Image (cartoon, rainbow, N blue to C red):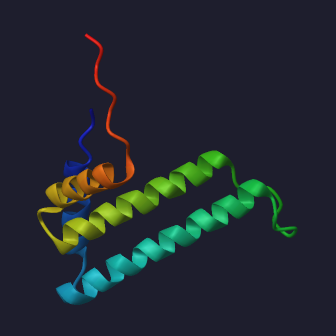
Amino acid sequence: MFDPWPTIDGLVNRLDAHSKLPRDQQLLLQLLKIQEETGEVAEAVIGAMGVNPRKGHSHTWKDVEAEVCDVIVTGMVALLRLNPEAPSILAQHLARITVRDLPPAPPQQG
């Protein structure tokens, strides 16, 4: 299975090397970037559904998928910029969600 964290780490390093802003401003802008990407999901959904009479069907559902991926990547970058232990933080959070929201796996027949 593909491990996304080396790519996310590379993106964080690239962003950090490019920015001359103080760390707190970098984090703030990274968190705002999540909202920007979410807006692009909304735009793509509206375009895929063709509900804007001025633009019609300007996007496909594949475009929506790509925009959702951008939200996920941007969120992962934000998490890693907040805390270098991001992979374990996300794993722990997913474990809590699994316990909270998913039924236990049925016993295996053997």
* Residue 35 shown left or right of residue 96 in the figure: right
Vertically, is 106 above or below 89?
above
Q: In the figure, is residue 62 to the left or right of 103?
A: right
Q: Quadrant of residue 47?
A: bottom right
- Relative to 27, 56 lies left or right: right
Give the answer, above or below, for where 17 lies relative to 32. above
Residue at left offset 57%, top offset 67%: 40
Give x and y (percent) for residue 25.
Answer: 26, 89
Residue 92 appears in the rendering: yes
Residue visible at 29% across and 70% down in the picture: 78
Identified at 28% across, 50% down, the residue is: 99
Q: Residue furthest left?
A: 85
Quadrant into which the N terminus falls: top left
Residue 101 point in image, percent of width and height: 38, 52
Quadrant in the picture for residue 74: bottom left
Q: How many marks?
A: 0
The quadrant the C terminus occupies is top left
Residue lying at the far top of the rendered structure: 110
Residue 17: tell me if it is visible: no
Q: Position of residue 66 (x, y in %)?
A: 52, 51
